[in-house]
Image: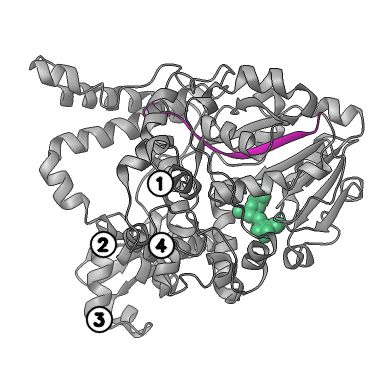
Amino acid sequence: MAKLNLSSWLSPSTSSNAGAERKKSNRMSFSAISSLSSSSKTKEAHVNGHESKPREPYAEAAPAAAAGQSPSGMVALAQKIARETEKIEAYMKEHNLPMPSFDVDAPADFPKLPANIQNSRHEIIAATRQLALLVHGPRESLRWGIWSFLDVLALQVINHFEIAKLFPAGETITLAELQAKTSLDPINLARLLRLAMTNGIFCEPSPNVIAHTAASRVLAEDGDLQAWVGFNAEDIFPASAHVLESLKAFPEATSLTRSGFCHAFGTVDKEPMFATFGKDPDRARRMGKAMVSLTGGEGYEVSYLVDVEGGGYDFGEIDAAGGTFVDVGGSHGFVCVDLAARYKNMKFVVQDLQKTIDTAPKPVCADPTIAERITLQAHDFFTEQTTEGADVYFFRWIIHNYSTPYAVKILKNLIPALKPGARIIINDHLLLEPGQENPWDESVMRRMDVVMLALLNAQERTEAEFRALFKAAGDGFVFKGVRRPKGCRMSIIEAVWQPDLVETANGDDSGAITNGVVVPEVDAPEANGVAKHEAVVEKPTEVK
Ligand SMILES: C[S@@+](CC[C@H](N)C(=O)[O-])C[C@H]1O[C@@H](n2cnc3c(N)ncnc32)[C@H](O)[C@@H]1O
């Protein structure tokens, strides 16, 4: 088993095998993180409306509680919850919006709210969590908090056996009748249902009689959500349970075939998750639907990218010149369809693996004025870019799927096709410093970061890490900065290909990089080897 050499990891340059350690490294060192803290407060404005100075987690509770003053931290939090809840309720009443409840016919989603009211909602989510932690106390929070995986277990079984679909929303069913419709035995069915009920999923209005709640009804009705729950419970949950094993064996955590997922499903050094799914159409379909559920969810809509007024990207100049936009790993082209609806002169190329292109709708959409400007093209991004001279190369939900060596390889593969001035735009989560994000968004993004670790040894990135990726991919990439549409969880990260300007531009701009972000020299994955990971099942050649 490989051992993590902590001292050389922390100070790679002092170690005799520093180069080798760096090659293996997928992350920046802790010293780099602390030295980055000022430089990563970006010069470019984030336009997402979050606070410019770091939020103190638990600021509400800590000082008063520590000083023993009144109101206590708990009361301050409770008052805040009451205050913000009243604001939301007043808004909802004024606009005749249905009130949330656990009832079976309650709305499945909290209504869309204007920014100031949405802010109240975020405050409530953060404050209720803090108050709960306080009233539990640290020991109890740890002792029982660790059991949250059992909630996942209950939902895993309920979702797998489609229990929510076994009786209609407005009706009740006895446990015996429900059991007769499944292969589960009565005791296990009852105990798992009753655990789920503690989380508002199903209820038991009278002994041994089961009814739906709003949550169980949504689970019955929303196929994409079922897929999301199934993908999480049956793929990500086992993968997560094997991350420790994978980190003990392979601490560098860069390889697609040595992730927690590979350990969970017996595919270590054989194939990455994509190839495993490639062999199992049902599982691949479930993941596809799960992605639809995720990307259709609040904060992820493509409209954020298109809505220039709301902080989206302005492609006006490129449109005026009739320029070309390449969506690399663009799936079935839905981003391009939305962009083409706004930009009437631009041309679009959607690139994806052959099998994905083969299953795309043709024409790509019903409107011929849009479809005629969108070309679907089979292209493997682990090979050299074939569409030369485009104005934009765009990556949405791509770079976060890969550890640094693979991500650098993807960017390097653009170089032969790039004309001076070409824009490279990445649309992914961008991690801020701890406490700078609103707590709910931070929680979602940090969990997503760890999901990427569990499945693919991949990661979400900070601005400094994106800068470092471009720097490692080639000197001609000049990092332009990041922006984030208001209300959106995803950021727009941009570099421009300017090989002639590189000395000045990166010289000024690359403080974060020279500040010690460890980017491994790219011992790049074999293009074909990685491509085969994605496309077919083949023994990979890759970074170990
Ligand atoms: C997470 S999805 C993102 C899809 C789309 N960009 C979006 O925003 O939803 C990753 C996409 O990358 C594609 N992909 C995976 N490996 C690829 C490769 N080697 N070359 C090209 N596309 C690839 C997948 O088929 C899939 O469509």
- Magenta stretch: dominant SS? strand
Determine whether 184 is above or below 201 in the image. Answer: below
Q: Quick check: 269 left or right of 476?
A: left
Q: Which residues are magenta?
A: 421-435
Of the numbered discs 1 and 4, the one sitting upstream in the chain is 4
Mark 1 is surrounded, within 10 Å at the Cα level, by few (under 14), some (14 to 19) or many (20 or more) other residues, namely few
Label annotation for residue 447: 1
For residue 186, which numbered disc appears in the image?
Answer: 3
**SS for callout 1:** helix
- Give x and y (percent) for residue 467: 59, 31
- Residue 405 at x, y percent in the picture: 57, 49
- Circle 3: element type: helix
Q: Which mark is first along the chain, 1 or 3?
A: 3
User: CA gap, disc 3 to disc 4?
Assistant: 33 Å
Q: Looking at the picture, how far across and down is residue 502, in whole percent?
A: 72, 24
Q: Residue at x 82, y 54 (%)?
A: 365
Quarter the N terminus occupies: bottom left
Q: Nearer the viewer, mark 3 or mark 2?
A: 2
- Per the image, the residue denoted by label 4 is 260
